[in-house]
Amino acid sequence: MTRLFCTLALLLGTLSAHAADIETAPLRIMCIGDSITEGSDGGYRLPLYQKLTALWGMPNMVGHRNSRTSDPAAFTDNDHDGYSAYRIEQITSGKGFWRAPSIERRLADWEPAIVTIHAGTNDAQQNYYFDGDAAQGIAPVIDRLDDLVGRIVAYNPDIEVFVATIIPANAPASEQTIAYVQRFNALVPGLVARHQALGHRVHLVDQYTPMLAYPNPDGIHPSAEGAQRMAEVWFEALAALGAAPVNFDPGRHWGVRQTDYWSRTRITPWTLVPSLVREGSATLAATDWVQYGGRRPVAVLNDGQLRRYATDGDNQWAVQYTLNTEAAPQGYDITQLRSAAGLPPAANGDEQAHQAFGIWVATVDAPQRFVRLGVFHHIMVSRDELGSQVVIDRTDGQPLARRVAAVQWRFTTPPRRQMGVFGITNPALYREVEVVGGVSD
């Protein structure tokens, strides 16, 4: 089996819940921009997060970066896609000091339902080819913004994209920067209107006018009061959608739920359920590990326990469970998939448990042909949550797959966040997988 690379990912953000509570995956929101989006102690994102929690329930703020704050407990979900000093084309490409992947890869990593964009301040402040330079192949600033928006809607036309005019610049910023901000903002409504005419879910947000009453202390970045006002403006725009949008995933009609989590102060045992692939079960014929460093850690993932874990360096590996079709020639119906991932409770709090995998099945009718059932990506929302248990099923009550002869879990590299200046590796430790179901009718 060749190494497996996923181009689609279903992001499951978890909630801090009790075992009796089963929650749907929270709404994923990606805030894109520069240092104004990164903010100080969460900037506008913290009050926006609080307002959206009150409206739609706790959202999952996503992005390539995770910034430290003076009080981590105040904002445990400090993920974002803001890059200090980046111009628009750097935000799009990811190329620059922060070494991010392209916008398409970031969207695939996190699959947001909502994207907010506040970008262009550094283009104005750095006097970077406002009108472009055809000889050097540099597009005008509004076309660079159009490229960013266009690549987002091309990746997924169902994403709700909120494009802001940028907040005013004021002294001590230069007069040229102040003028460029005004010129840039005059062009943004036309860009949004063009996308709306094409049927794209692109919305205009005026962050300029409301912020005139809140001068920036350094001429560029908002004060605490200004950040609060920015949050109010963003919130009003998002709330106008009415109901919360739906997360867009390869298995979007399946229920992907969290059953529990564990942290440094709380450990919850794995809840046992009948599993077709549990080691020793009469329904399991064989367990085969593929590209696992030459080792065969039998029963690590399917022994019903959380005491051990499996990982394989770059996380590109697989395990196949062949079901006992001698006992059931008609195969098995899969009604539920379960997984658990996480670091040991004593691990450094800066590390977060990640899990990314694809599920492939072969049926008794074509036992050598594996078909992808779905690709899933599971992360922690809070830095205090070091692991969790998740359930994948269908909301309509139908089986996930019928007449199954074998199941493959293909593990892949999860997205990598950046904490401050340095990237963190987000080690993936897989603790348990289970396949729930029974003999097909």
Image (cartoon, rainbow, N blue to C red):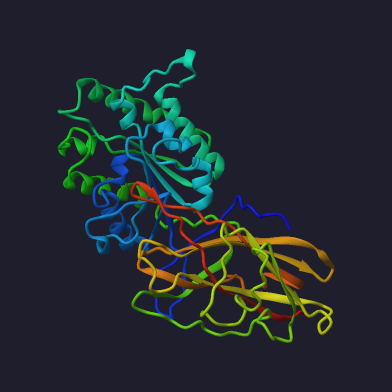
Front in this rendered view, residue 297 or 75: 297
Q: Extreme top residue here?
A: 135
Front in this rendered view, residue 9 or 387: 387
- Picture layout, residue 201 above or below residue 128: below
Q: Residue at x 37, y 64 (%)?
A: 382
Quarter location, residue 4: bottom right
Q: Residue at x 18, y 47 (%)?
A: 224
**Picture coordinates of residue 358, whole percent (x, y):** 63, 61
Q: Is residue 101 visible?
A: yes
Q: Is residue 200 visible?
A: no
Asked if residue 165 lies left or right of residue 372, the reply is: left
Asked if residue 121 lies left or right of residue 436, the reply is: left
Q: Quadrant of the N terminus?
A: bottom right
**Picture coordinates of residue 197, whole percent (x, y):** 50, 33
Q: How many numbered marks does the figure carry?
A: 0
**Picture coordinates of residue 304, whole percent (x, y):** 58, 82
Front in this rendered view, residue 33 or 23: 33
Q: Quadrant of the C terminus?
A: bottom right
**Picture coordinates of residue 81, whole percent (x, y):** 39, 46
Q: Residue at x 51, y 35 (%)?
A: 150
Asked if residue 336 lies left or right of residue 384, the reply is: right
Q: Residue at x 35, y 59 (%)?
A: 77
Front in this rendered view, residue 184 or 391: 391
Quarter location, residue 391: bottom right
